[in-house]
Each structure stands twice: as structure tokens, then as C-alpha cells.
Image (cartoon, rainbow, N blue to C red):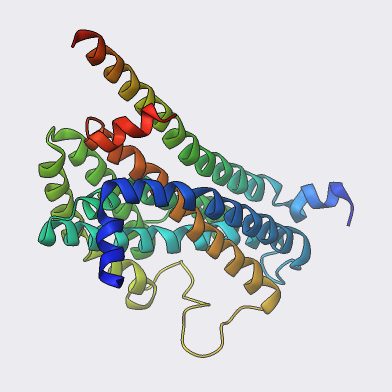
Amino acid sequence: MFNNFFHKLASPKYFYRISGNLIPWTAAACLLLVLAGLYYGLLVAPPDYQQGDSYRIMFIHVPAAWMSLFIYMVMAVSGAIGLVWRIKLAEIMAISSAPIGASFTFLALVTGSLWGKPMWGTWWVWDARLTSELILLFLYLGVIALHGAIEDRRTAARAVAILALVGVINIPIIHFSVEWWNTLHQGPTVTRFGKPAIHISMLIPLLLMALAFKLYYVFTVLMRARCELLVREGNAGWARELVAAK
Amino acid sequence: MSLNEFLHMGGYAFYVWTSYGIALLILLANIIAPVRQHRKLLSDISRRTRRERRES
């Protein structure tokens, strides 16, 4: 039965229907979490004793940076699944993830810059963390450009998956960059072993925003996947019936 | 805390509000783009179906 469910889910028609039902609920939950995160992050959490109110950029910056890595891994893994088992839906998830991942990477870089200026006195330094995150943005843009350059969707998906897999090497480099090299960027405060080095009043909004961003990714990637599905299968019977039924 | 104080963000208003503003723009853009594309794809399919029905 379980197996059957996944087979059904991987069929375009069922995926289209189930994702269509899932999107509004995920979006609503995401909105609630964002509002709660903003309330706790901007109104409840006290100013930092060193950084004043500037640290509130963290509630955008850190979740965005986490998402930039998480989405890349999702993209690479689903790309690999598409490559090995030729599952159409895996290819679609991979390419649909790219623009969202690029957006979060860009957001992490820009908010980092806006935080760096008042705290470090500079918008940008060529240190390990910042440079490897910039390379991540170029990897995403490379994936998007490569996909756009190849006419045949399935060939494009294969090329994209290989590029994404090669780029995976960058992910541990980003994560450990603050430990391997001397850098202006501070070390991890949440994901390190033991007690997080962050007060609970700041941890709550951070986790709320992180969860909100994760749900945001879920519903926007489904929206994009449905589009990509229609691009590929717009002439198939199920798509025609769907439009005719409206 | 007054509204002015809140907006002032302890002197970091520009950095904080620009960050949140850009985040809002990027997140909204990533919703609007697929919504518009989806609408266009559905209308393309129905146009194609109607045309083929006329031709046959």
C-alpha cells in the first residue's frame, strides 16, 4: 500500500492534484509563523548588549543562509534521483528548487552585507564564509542558465543534476569555513554541540523564522513544480481534462 | 516603547528595515512569478485545445 502511494504520487496527475491541495495550507501555516516570528523578533526580544538592535537582521539572515544550503542539498539529491532512476518528478523538483535557492542565497548575502556594515565597518570582505556563499549563488545561477540553454527538458535535467552534484563540494566548505579559516564571520551559535550560545528570547524568533522559511520553500517549490509539469505535459490528456473541467 | 523608538531601531533603522524590506520583496516575487506563470500555462492549454477542436 505504501509503495502504491509513492507510485501514485510520482504520477504527474496525482502530484498535480495533491500539491494543489497542499499549497494553500502550507502557505497559511507559513504566514502565521512569519507573523509570530516578526512579533517575537521585532517586539519581544530585547536589544543585544553588544550589537543593539542591529542584530535583528539575524532573524532574516540566518534562516535565509540555512535555506540556501538546505535547498541546494534537496536540489542535488533530487537531481541525482532523477539521474539514476529517471523519475520525471525528481527532475522537476530539482529544477524548481533552483530559483528559490538562488533567492535565499542572495537574501543571505545582502542581509549579511547590511549587518556587516554597522558591525564590521565594511559591506564585504573576501573571506572564506562570504566567498563560498557567493560561489553558491553562482552555482544556482549556473544551474538556472544551463537549464535554460538546453531545449530538451530531459537532457537539460540531466545536465543540471550533474552540475548540482559537482557543486555539492561547496556545501561543507561553507558550513565549516568559519572553523577552518580565520574569518570576520562569527562561528555557529545554534548548531554547535551542547547548549546554544544564544538567549532563549532570541532563539524563539530565530526558530520560528527558520520554520516559516522552510514552509515557504515547500509551497513555492510545489507551485513551481506544477508549472514545470504543465510545461512538459501540457499536451497530455490529464492536463487537457483538467483545463476543460474549469 | 513608542512607535518612533521602534522605527528608529536604536539607530540601525536603515540596516534593519532595508533587510526586512528586501526579504519581503524577494519572498513576494517568488510567489507572484509562479502564480502568473501557472495562469498563463492554463490559458495556453485551453487555447490550444479549442484551436485543435476547430481544426478537426
Which quadrant of the figure has residue A171? bottom left
Is A153 displayed left or right of A170 in the figure? Answer: left
* Extreme residue toward the right, this view: B2
Q: Is residue A61 visible?
A: yes
Is A225 displayed left or right of A206 in the figure? Answer: left
Compared to residue A21, the image places residue A176 above or below, namely below
Is A173 displayed left or right of B30 in the figure? Answer: left
x then y, percent, for residue A207: 58, 69
Q: Residue at x 46, y 88 (%)?
A: A193
Which residue occupies the foreground of this view, A118 or A26? A26
x then y, percent, for residue A97: 33, 50
Compared to residue B47, the image places residue A188 above or below, namely below
Which quadrant of the figure has residue A227? top left
Is A166 displayed left or right of A1 in the figure? Answer: left
Q: Residue at x 31, y 59 (%)?
A: A72
* Badge count: 0
* Extreme residue toward the bottom, this view: A194
x then y, percent, for residue A107: 47, 49
Compared to residue A45, the image places residue A12 above or below, namely above
Q: Residue at x 31, y 57 (%)?
A: A9
